[in-house]
Amino acid sequence: MSPTPRVVIVGAGIVGANLADELTTRGWNRVTVVDQGPLPLTGGSTSHAPGLVYQTGPSKTMTAFAQYTVEKLRGLDVDGAWCFNQVGGLEIATTPERLADLHRKQGWATSWGVPGTVVGPEECARLHPLLDPDEVLGGFHTPTDGLGKSSRAVIALARRAQAAGAEFRGSTRVLGVDQQGGRVTGVRTDQGDIPADIVVSCAGFWGRRVGDMVGMKVPLLPMAHQYARTDQIPELVGHNDELSEARLPILRHQDHDLYYREHNDRIGIGTYAHRPIPVSLADLPETEDGSTSEEAMPSMLPFTDDDFAPSWEQSKRLLPSLSTAKVEDGFNGVFSFTPDGGPLIGESPDVAGFWIAEAVWVTHSSGVARSVAQLLVDGRSEVDLHGCDVHRFDEIETVDDYVEETSKQNFIEIYDVTHPSQPKLSPRDLRVSPFHARQRELGAFFLESHGWERPQWYEANAPLVKELPNHWYPRPRDPWSAMYHSPIAAAEAWKTRNAVAMYDMTPLKRLEVTGPGATAFLDRLTTSKMDRVPGYVAYTLLLDQAGGVRSDITVARLDAHTFQVGVNGNLDLDRLRRELPADGSVQIRDVTGGARGWHRRLGPARPRPRPATEPRRLLRRGPEVLPVHACPRRRHPRHGAAGVLRR
């Protein structure tokens, strides 16, 4: 039996320790975990995390991560001390908008398999007696949520991984990642070199620094988040002990960006209600001997009282027992935030064997680690990772200024009631179509995707709504469902189906696939035969390694060795690049913003194929008709012109 790969994990926090455990459980025993801090309290986010684990969210993937974290941590202990205290969770509503959102959240929980019930004010007060029921309209109770003791779980996970062959090295600073021939070969540290076939950065908010060692952009922003503890609360005296720490449900007051948990006879309060506080790694405190403690570590910055003052007043209003209490201690803890709030998982596009698992909170730590281990060992995660893949961002979304602005906004909106179609307010107008000015004149309603301004409907087409047949007219929507929607879109779809319409395809990512091996390459990765005459356009499916559906794409053959491929984003580009043959017989180039993509920027759509060059009266977008940009020199085998999409 051949030996398993040599794996070096950078970061011994909750993600790195979980990954070491997941890999050794699968028989990979040549695993080394290094951390610049001392073990087991290394001084990263894990060391001070408050540990609230709420499983339910709009993402099935993130909920699955959290469910596995609960399952795994419940099975761990350190000498009899718990790693997960299943006290349950309670999210309260003080506005009708929030209460409606909690009902939606109950729907997600039901779909994802998380027990949860929306309850009234009196039941909220019964579950959490410190609550003032007059302040709340209701709550969402989730009995399987609870507290994860991350600093203790790291010990349990490390012990189990070490027993299976893993090695943990503390006080070991990574200086560089060695590579040869486009593949990692080892890690250089201040304690010597460590050979490696695979390197996984689980360095948390230090992740950008580790990514820089191989030239990989890691779009995250370290930010400070306030956490405080009160002095003794009389109502909690004798309620808990040092071992249990808490019996009341963890509590979220999202209308004011607050959460609460017990610390024996004290209350811990976390808040996102303060200004965003980006953190420079150069400003993090360090002790002379590199030691850490629960009171002093690099990820704990001085508490800023003025930022906390409004949250303290709101807390006293919700929990009257705090009216006679005071804040005993607090800190500004450093965490990682990303442009869309999701974690970052994936392999470097340029250096094989270098992986990252960053911007992962305790809530999702075990689930993320399991998926990364499955990627490494099996080549595929059982959980869909497209919303977590680091390559989901276009290049413009990894620029420092963009990462900072969008990450700060995600901090502000972290507990907001946000519609799934709600666009960013800023930055906007980063990438626009050549027809953008005309689209604005015609009353386009724009949403944003990957920096592109994309029209959803045109007010100029509002008169068409009166012509809609009854069976085409949209069903009535409640106010929530009606957001970012208009019946004009239905009218435009009806005209597309029954007449002719013109669509601006500028934001569609277009790739040029060329070379003598291009036909066989696309043949292998899609569900269509690509050996067709030039001018043929295929709507097809892009497959993953296991033959599952990765994406739906459009492939146009331009000549014997050239294809233009319309894909759904950077993830598809990354997938195709990773499958390129080693002999250099295929090349891929992104031509979305270039001249070669110009003739594809406008696409006619019609119910029955017609020559695109035949004079027709197109769907009018106002007093003028948008022009047709035909594809010169490309002829469809049946209809004599390019752009006819065969489905």
Image (cartoon, helix red, strand yellow):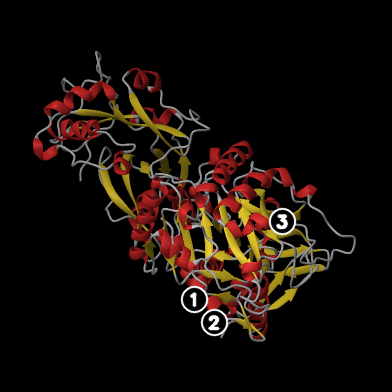
Q: Position of residue 336 (x, y in %)?
A: 63, 53
Residue 379, visible in the rendered structure: no
**Label pair 3/2, CB-CB below 8 angstroms:** no
Which numbered tag is attached to residue 75? 2
Q: Position of residue 165 (x, y in %)?
A: 66, 83
The CA distance from mark 1 to mark 3 is: 34 Å
Which numbered tag is attached to residue 71? 1
Q: Position of residue 383 (x, y in %)?
A: 43, 65
Which numbered disc, 1 or 3, marks the residue closer to the eye?
Answer: 3
**Label pair 1/2, CB-CB below 8 angstroms:** yes
For image coordinates 32% across by 55% down, the residue present is 526
- When asked about the image quadrant of residue 29, the answer is bottom right
- 10 Å neighbourhood of mark 3: few (<14), some, or many (≥20)? some
163, 47: nearer the viewer: 47
Residue furthest out toward the right: 288
Q: Amino acid at mark 1?
A: Glu
Please give left or right for residue 534 compared with residue 205 in the image. Answer: left
The CA distance from mark 3 to mark 2 is: 34 Å
For image coordinates 23% across by 39% down, the residue present is 645
Q: Quadrant of the N terminus?
A: bottom right
For image coordinates 20% across by 41% down, the residue present is 476
Q: Amino acid at mark 3?
A: Val
**Which residue does the numbered mark 3 point to in the structure image?**
327
100, 501: nearer the viewer: 100
Q: Is residue 114 above or below residue 594?
A: below
289, 314: nearer the viewer: 314
**Label pair 1/3, CB-CB below 8 angstroms:** no
User: Which circle's residue, 3 or 2, is located before the other in the chain?
Assistant: 2
